[in-house]
Image: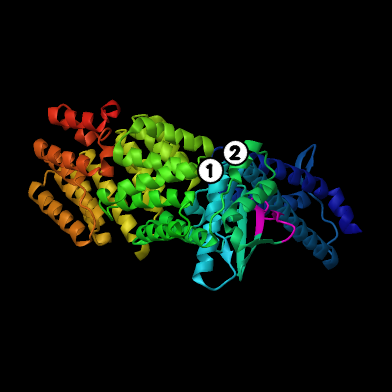
Amino acid sequence: MSLFRDLQNRHVFKVAGIYIAVAWGATEILLTIIDRLRLPEYLGTVIVILFVVAFPVAMFLAWVFDITPDGVQRTPGTSKSVFSISLATVFLVASTAGLYYFLDWRAQQDQVEQTALVLPLRSIAILPFESADADASSAALAIGIADELLTRLGAIPDLKLTGRASSFSTALHGLDAKTIGQKLGVRNILQGSLRSTGKKLRINLSLVDAVSGYQVWAPAEPIDIDREDLYRVSADLAAQVVEGMDINVGSDTMTRVTHARRADPAAYDLYLLGMPKLRDMVGDNTMLAVRYFEEALGIEPDFAKAHAALSNALQAATLFQFIPPDEALAKAREAAKQAIALDPELPDGYAALGGLDWNFYWNWGPVVEANNHALALAPSNFDVLASYGFVMALTGHFDTGIERMRQVAELDPLTVDHQVQVGWVLQWAGRYEEALDQYNYAMSVIPDDDKHQLMRSTTNMHIALTLASLGRSEEAQAACERSMQMAERDVLMASGTAILHARLGMRERALQLFEEYEAIADASGGYADPITGLYVYAALGDYERAIDYAEQAVDDRSSSVVFIPQDRDLDPLRDNPRFVALMERTGLTPWAR
C-alpha cells in the first residue's frame, strides 16, 4: 500500500483529476473554435495528441515536486522497490491510455453532434438499387425504379433531395453511409435491391442514418410486386420511404407523390430503360433514349410519362446537335401536349413544354408560367430547380439565377456539369473573375483519366473564353492549346475553338477553324449551328455577316438563340437596325440587355 500512499501524499490523484477536467474542457472549447472558424479538421486530432503526450509529463512533475509555502520543492524520496516502481509505471501507462481514449471518444461525439446539426433531417439521397440478377436488363430496371422514386419524392416541399447524377455516381461505390452523407450533405441514405423472378419483383429497402451509420428503418418484410403493376412500383416505394423518414407530408402532397396511371408493363419497362439513357446524354445514349420511348408509345399510346420523356429526348438531341431542329421540334411539342392532356397532374409534361418554348420558340412569358406550375407540383425536383435557375439568369435576374444554380450545384455536388453551369451564369452577369474561379474549381474536381478528357477539354475551353473576355490573350491562347491536346475535337469543341481565335483577333485562323467546324458537323451527320458564325463574325467586327448567321439561327430555331439577349460579347450589335428587328421578331427584346 506504500505506492498508493505515495500517490496520495504527492497529490498525483488530485493533479490527474484536475488535468483531465482541464483537458476535457479545453478540448471542447478548441473543437468548437475549429468548427466555427472552419479550420482544418486534423487540428482536433493534434490537440488530443498534445494533451495525451503532456499527461505523463504532468504526472511525473506531480510525483517529483510538491507545491509548498516556500515554493516548488523536490519531494523527499520514498519507496523505491521494484514492485512499487512497476505499479507506478502500470498506473502511468493505463491512465495515459485511458485519457487518450476518453478525449478521442469526446472528439468523436462532438463530431457526431456537429454532423447532426449540419445535415438536415429532411434530406435524403437515393442510391441506385442493386440487381440480384445477372442480366443487364434487370440492372437497368433497378436503376430506373430508383430514378422514378427520386422524381416522385421531388413533390415534397422543403426536402433536400440529392440530384440523381451524384446519388448514382460510381464515386460512392464501396463507401459507408457516414462518408456518403458527408459527401452529399444529407442525413438519410436509401439503399435498395431488386430481384426478378418470372412475373414477380421483390424489392428490399433500407434507410440508413448518415450520422450514426445505423439502419433506422426498413419494411417489415420484402416488397413483392407483380410485373403487371410495374407502373406503380415507384409510387408504392415512395409511400414507404415517406413513412420511414417520419416526415410530415400533407394529403395533397402525398397524393402527388403516389399519383400513378396504369401503363402496359412492357411499355413501362422500356420507359425505365430509356430514362437513364436520357439522363446520361453521352455518345449515342440520347438517340437510344428516343428509340426506347418511341417503342414504349408503340405499345401504350396513352402513356403520358413516355410522351413527356420523348419530348425531352428530342429536345436534347437537338440541343447537342445530333439532329436538326426541323426534324424534331414539331414532334417534341406534340409529345409534350399529349403528356399534359393525358395526365394534367404530371409535372413532366409542363416542364417539357416549357423547355420547348424556352429553347426553341422563345415564348418566354408562358415559359415562366409553365416553370412556376412545374415548381408548384414538384418543389424539390432537381430538374425543375435547375430550369428555374436558367430562366432567371437569361431574363436578367442574375442574383436569383446565380443563387438557384449554386443551390443546384450543392444538391448535385459530384456532378461537374452544374459547377460549369454556375460559371456560365456568372459570365452572363459580367462577373468574369468569379466565372474563372468557378471553372478552375470545376477543373480541379474532374477526374484526370481517359473517360473524362472530353469534359476536361470543354471546361478548359470555357476558361480560355473567359480569359479572352478579361483581355488576357496569351493565357487564353495557352488554355486553348491545352484544351485541344486533351481530347479529339467534337462539334461543340470545334465551335469554341473558332470563336476563341476570333476573339483573339486571329482572323485567318478563326475562319479556317470555322470551316473545320462545319466540316466536322457534316461528317458526323449532325447540325452545324449558325450561332457559331454569329459569334465568330461578331468578334471579327464583320457585323452584317454576323447578323446573316443570326437570322439563319432564328430561322432554324437554334436553341442557342436563348443566349443572345444577355451575352455581352454581342453588345456591339445591339444598336444595329437589322439586329434590333431580328430581336423583335423573336420576341426577345424585353429580355435583352
Q: Secondary structure at mark 1?
A: loop
Residue 45 location in percent, x, y? 61, 51
Q: Residue at x 15, y 56 (%)?
A: 516
Left or right: residue 253 compared with residue 467: right
Q: Is residue 360 at all visible to an observer of this figure?
A: yes
Q: Is residue 449 at all visible to an observer of this figure?
A: no
Left or right: residue 495 compared with residue 164: left
Magenta stretch encompasses residue 500? no
**Quadrant occupied by the C terminus:** top left
Residue 417 location in percent, x, y? 39, 49
Q: Quadrant of residue 366?
A: top left
Which residue occupies the foreground of this view, 490 or 270?
270
Q: Which residue is mark 1?
A: 39
Neighbours of disc 2 within 10 Å: few (<14), some (14-19), many (20+): few
Q: CA distance from mark 1 to mark 2?
A: 8 Å
Which label belongs to residue 427? none
What's drawn in magenta, residue-wise? Answer: 205-221
Task: Name the outermost residue toward the bottom.
Answer: 134
Residue 100 against residue 563 in the figure, above or below:
below
Q: Earlier in the sequence, mark 1 or mark 2?
A: 2
Left or right: residue 529 compared with residue 329: left
Q: Quadrant of residue 193?
A: bottom right
Decide: marks 1, 2 in contact (CB < 8 A)? yes
Which residue occupies the foreground of this view, 71 or 248?
248
**Quadrant occupied by the N terminus:** bottom right
Q: Residue at x 18, y 44 (%)?
A: 473
Q: Which residue is mark 2?
A: 33
Residue type at mark 1: give it.
Leu
